[in-house]
Image (cartoon, helix red, strand yellow):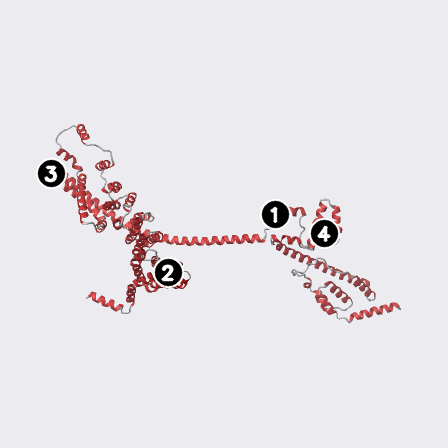
Amino acid sequence: MAEEQAISDEAAGYRHLLDINWTEVADNLIKSRLLLTALELHTELLENGREVPFLRDFFSNPGNFEVESVRAPSSPILFHLGRTSSNLTLDSIDDFTRYSDDGLGEKGDDRIAVLQFELRKAHDTIKSLRGSLTVATEQEGPQNTQKDASETSSLNEETIKPHEKRALNFLVNEYLLQNGYRLTSVTLSDENEDQDFDDWDDVGLNIAQPPNLLRLYRDYDKHAMPMAASTLAKTEEENAKLEETCKKLNEQLEQLRKENERNEQNQRIIEEQMSNLTDEKSNLVTQITTLTDELAQSKQRLLTNNSEQTIIPAPELAEDSSSSSQTTSSIPDNKSNDSGVGLSDSLQNGPRLSDTEGNSVEDERNEEETPQVSISDTDTSAPISKTENDHLCQRKLCPTFKQALLNIAQVQHDSRVSNEVARLAKTEESAVLVLSRCLPHIVPNVLLNKREELLPLILCTAIHHPEEKERDKLLHSLVNLIKRPDAEQRRMIITGCSAFAHVVGHMRTEAELLPQLWEQINHKYPERRQLVAEACGTLAQYLPTEIVSSLLLSMLKQMFAEDRNDSVRATVIKSLALVMTIVESPSKYKEAEQLLVQALCDNSEEVREATLNVLLPAVLAWAHELDKLQSDLLEFILQQLELTLSDFIHIEKSKADDETELESTMTIISSRLLLYVRALTNSVAALMADVLNRAPFQEECDALERETTLS
């Protein structure tokens, strides 16, 4: 009776279970990730004949059992399966099968199959968890190595993670067993009963077992990675160095590009010079051939005349010899006149002497012409000197006795002059070579106020001497002829430089004369520096525009910026005006405007007056030629005037504060205002001409002028 009551109560309990909505329960279990409980529920309901379609579809899909590899940083990593015992479920199965019509063997097989399925799912879950733990460990490894050294203390204070603890326990236990600490190993095993020290897979990582502790300790320093901060700093430093290197390389590339352009320009200039030299060489070869033929013909005629001569009296012989010397000397005279016509014209038109000095110079020239004829007579009469001696001396004397008498009568002095005279008798050197040797000894012994008389000799020798070294010495003597030359003496020297440049051409002027002037640019005497400034302006007309735009303009700008002498800077301004009339490059026009303003603001009254009277007209003419008079030059001067006026007004307003400190500034600004106004006043004539050229009736005026000219 009691058994029936128990069976009825149990059946009532099962009926109560039939009234529950198992779909909602299964959904709640799945959402809570209680998969094992849901599996047990599915198995029990399946055995009771109450299969839930939701559980059937869920457990039949293998994708529902893949563990996510990425977890939130704050979520803990589970290493153990929190599986509870299912004895109650198994008992209920036993009780249920006790009253079932099926056999015990069939139900046992079903229970074994369920348990095997459950075990297989548990193993899969364990593998998934191990894989997730391995991935999480590998992702955390690089992050830990990139922390700064300042975080070392915080790393030491962090709590050890479970998988790290299990791995370290395994390695420590292995170390204890290998080194004979068995009692300590047993104690460690007793204190960690939840870990199997015989199986590395129990750690929970899907990685190979690491080496023992000893090898890890020895390999620690070998695998230490640099800190991220130091690596980043080094990278930034290298990046900065690379950027700096790149910048330097770009600057060097730009410099090389500019240098290449200059070299190409110089190459074109050199090619033009080579072409001119080739033409000049061909002309000189032609002239040399012509002169050689004339010289041969003259010698032939001279030999013919000498062979036909008979014994003639001494006076007639002297007349014939003088006439022959004049005939033979005409050939080199013609040559020198052809090559040095510009020099003679420049020197004759250059210095103007007084009547007394002119007469004395003419007397000296007449006196100098007589010995030149005698020297030429000696040269031309050399072949007939034996005949002359035979006619003059009829007595037969012993040569030794005659030489002894000559030694007694004539005293021999071993000096430079006597050696030069003796050398003239033995050789047939040209007068240029003799002058090149004698002039350095003559110049120091001539009075300062008479040294300009040596200019023709120095220039002629420098022009025609074949050796470049000797020409440099002669030009050095020309530039340094007078220690501190005055205005008249500087004019004479510059006239000589102009004659030299006119005769030899721009190539030799650039190569030989300009370096001599360049050496004087920083001379201690202002007269010498003033000579350089005047020479630059005068020689500009004999040089190519490229040299004038680059070398001469740079020399004058340097002298204006560095020289402290007012007279020298005023002379530089005048020479700049000459250079501005020759420069053709429009790119240099802005430099001309800047130089004009700098010169107007100079502290020297002499420099400012030279700027207004000389440099300003030259710049106005250039601006008119470039059609920039109204748009650039006058606009620029007006801007400077407005700026100066604004400064003046500002200082005038603040003058009440401290009058003593602003007095000098007011004076300077007032003078600048006056200078700019004077510059505009001096520009009115050029502006008027520019306006007339732009007028609409200009074409009619030009046509009328042409008609008037033709008629």
Q: Which residue is mark 3?
A: 315
Q: Nearer the viewer, mark 2 or mark 3?
A: 2
SS for dot 3: helix
CA gap between label 2 and label 4 equals 100 Å
Q: Position of residue 374 (x, y in %)?
A: 17, 40
Front residue (pair 115, 638): 638
Q: Give the labeled residue for mark 1.
A: 222
Q: Which residue is mark 4?
A: 199
Q: Which image quadrant: the C terminus?
A: bottom left
Which residue is tagged 2?
666
Q: Earlier in the sequence, mark 2 or mark 3?
A: 3
User: Could you say where residue 407 lies in the image, as x and y percent from the top left?
Assistant: 19, 30
Disc sitting over residue 25 in the figure: none
Regarding residue 360, the answer to whether it shows in the image is yes
Tell me: residue 317, above or below residue 697: above
Q: Amino acid at mark 1?
A: Lys
Q: Closest to the observer: 455 or 297?
A: 455
Q: Seen from this angle, which residue lies furthest left?
A: 313
Residue type beneath disc 3: Pro
- Observer able to see residue 69: no
SS class, disc 4: loop
* Disc 4 residue type (three-letter): Asp
- The residue carrying pointer 3 sits among few (fewer than 14), some (14 to 19) or many (20 or more) residues within 10 Å by Cα, namely few
Ranked by sequence position, the earlier of labels 2 and 4 is 4
Q: Could you classify mark 2 by the number of other residues whose Cα lies within 10 Å: few (under 14), some (14-19), or many (20 or more)?
A: some
Would you say the residues marked 4 and 3 are in contact, meaning their CB atoms lie under 8 Å apart? no
